[in-house]
Amino acid sequence: MDSRIPRIDQDDLVRIRRQLHMYPELRWDLPMTSALVREELDKIGIPYEADKYGKNSVVATVNPEKTGFTIGLRADMDALPITESNEDKPYRSRHEGIMHACGHDAHTAMMIGTARALWEIRDQIGCRVRLLFQPCEEGRPSGARIMCEHGVMDDIDCIVMCHVNCIDPTHVISSCPGTTNATSIAWKITLGGRAVHVASPHMGIDALSAGVKIYNGIQTIVSREVDPFDTCVMAVCCMHAGTTVSTNADECVLEGSIRCLKDGTMAWARARLEKLAKSVAEECGTSWSIDWSGDPLPSAHNDPALYEAFAASARKAVGAERVILLPPSPGGEDFAYYEQLKPGLLFGLGMRNEAKGACHPAHTKDWDIDEDGLETGVKVFVQFVLDYMDHGRKPE
């Protein structure tokens, strides 16, 4: 390990992560989470700005006077509307129906640990470092987008983030040059029919029947019309219709999302879904409408030059055998908004340990992590800053 990296307090990282895990909050409504972050930053003594870049956002700065080059580091803070099932864990969520099921508690804890380490060696760091604690990665409007609209990237030259996973073993670092995450958008199709008694179906218009045709049509689109070497996920996640067993459904609502690695494929998929809904509605005699969640979340792309520099730092921190390539994911990541403005890099940190039950997919009720990896995340962030701090420095 680089001798410049100070001692990382693993016990403190676990304490912070568990406190966050016990009291998860959603989207922009993060009063307890934001307060904990500010409290920990106050203990360190590092200056920060709260709410300047959006509700409950916090941005801390190491070496604010060193304006020649600025590295940004980002952690997301929000949880998910999921009921946790880890009854045997003392740090299980105390907020029923809300759970840190995607590792944002770990991200926030590691970023606080990184802030502490960088502040301790700030005299050895030749650049400014901005640490972004971001709300609402899991919802819309995107926290990253709002922070960018408020100018958070104006004085940042490059930005790096970590996402933990329970796919790779603990301490394994994954990243890649190029695409990391898909463009994505949510949709809602509403079909209107005419309810009649089930004994006289010919006198009504069955909205459920039309919904089933759309559902089946989507499966055919993906299997028969998408290039097998491309990536397009068009998922129906819920469908609601009807209220009784004695009348047909006069309304059917389908909701889902589209995820594509290519922006062009996303444009095609949106148009194709609208065409399917329209044609089925006309065939079945229903009314129809389609609502989108907004503009598609952009696809995320690691800057190739930044990747090469980061991979070298990661190998220093964990050893070459623990640094692997990250395959592109159909999952969305609003980190893409930062990357639209400046070079960015996403890296994965393995937290899988079956002996500890840390082996379940993200966004599920059984999710947990191997907390031994928290210290590793901090070390990788600090190593990268130390190695990259003189890159592209401008005259001050």
Image (tube, rainbow, N blue to C red):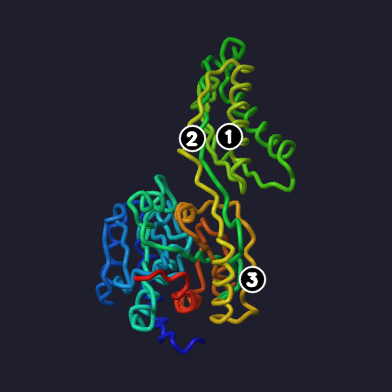
Kindly indicate the quadrant of the structure image that contains residue 68: bottom left
Whether residue 139 is visible to the viewer of this picture, yes or no, is yes
* Label pair 2/3, CB-CB below 8 angstroms: no
Which residue lies at the image location 39% right of the left edge and 62% below the top edge? Answer: 156
Dot 3 falls on a residue whose secondary structure is strand
Q: Which residue is mark 1?
A: 270
Q: Is residue 119 left or right of residue 345?
A: left
Which residue lies at the image location 36% right of the left edge and 74% below the top edge? Answer: 115
Mark earlier in primary sequence (1, 2): 1
Which quarter of the rendering shows the C terminus?
A: bottom left
Neighbourhood count class around disc 1 (C-alpha, 10 Å): few under 14, some 14–19, many 20 upward:
some
Q: Which residue is mark 2?
A: 292
Residue lying at the far bottom of the rendered structure: 3
Which amino acid, by three-letter code, is at mark 2?
Trp
Residue 105 percent location from the top left of the image: 41, 65
* Count of number-bearing discs: 3
CA separation in Å, label 1 and label 2: 9 Å
* Label pair 1/2, CB-CB below 8 angstroms: yes
Dot 1 falls on a residue whose secondary structure is helix
Kindly indicate the quadrant of the structure image that contains residue 325: bottom right
